[in-house]
Amino acid sequence: MTLKRSDEHLIVLRRKAISQAKLRGMTLNQIAVWLEEEGLTNPETNQPWSITTISNDLKEIEAEWKGQMLVDITDHRARVMAEFGEVKNAAWKAGKLDTVLRALKGEIDLLGLNELERMDKEIALARLLEGLPPQIRDAVRAKLAKRVSNTKSKTNLKLLNPPSKRAV
């Protein structure tokens, strides 16, 4: 079924109003009442829009929001990557290798390169554990979990209590 321009326009106006209401924290029922109060009713029936119509519109609106968010994140990451490149270029020219390394660390974090490496190790470990008998597998998992927990605790303690600088 092809929509007429007037129908498309009506849908756009209704969804804009529903979007505003949702962003103000209104429930479906509250949105239905608010639309009616604003004079936005179904022109074919002169009745308030149904909860089903509002719910379907919200699903479309939220899908649009998610799609836009992904575009925004991609654009933002691209801009930040360009900025890291500019910082590295200036740092190389100035001979500031510590700044170059910090910019590289920022790029690695932004792109999640360390996360991918960690995931590869976890996948390999999971495959290795698959072949072990259940008792041994569970014991190895418990030991690994304890070791990871201890490592995280030590790292957090170091961050909370950095070594004091002594005067030399």
Image (cartoon, rainbow, N blue to C red):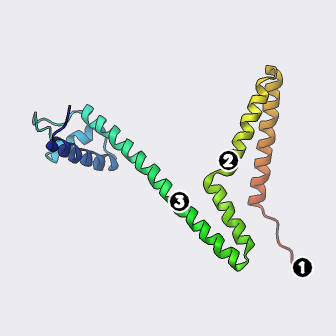
| Tag 1 near tag 3, CB within 8 Å | no
Label 2 SS: helix
Q: Report the residue at 76% width, 43% height from top.
A: 149
Which residue lies under the disc numbered 2?
A: 115
Viewer-proximal residue among 59 and 21 = 59
Residue 123 rendering spot, x and y as whole percentages: 71, 35
Label 1 SS: loop
User: Which of the 4 image quadrants contains residue 27?
Assistant: top left
Q: Which image quadrant: the N terminus? A: top left
Which residue lies under the disc numbered 3?
A: 78
| Amino acid type assigned to the residue bearing label 2 in the image | Glu
User: Which of the 4 image quadrants contains residue 94?
Assistant: bottom right
Viewer-proximal residue among 63 and 35 = 63
Label 3 SS: helix
Calculate the distance from the C-alpha at mark 2 to the C-alpha at mark 3: 19 Å
Q: Which image quadrant: the C terminus? A: bottom right
Q: Which mark is residue 168?
A: 1
| Amino acid type assigned to the residue bearing label 3 in the image | Ala
How would you rate the neighbour count of disc 2 (Cα within 10 Å): few for under 14, some for 14-19, many for 20 or more? few
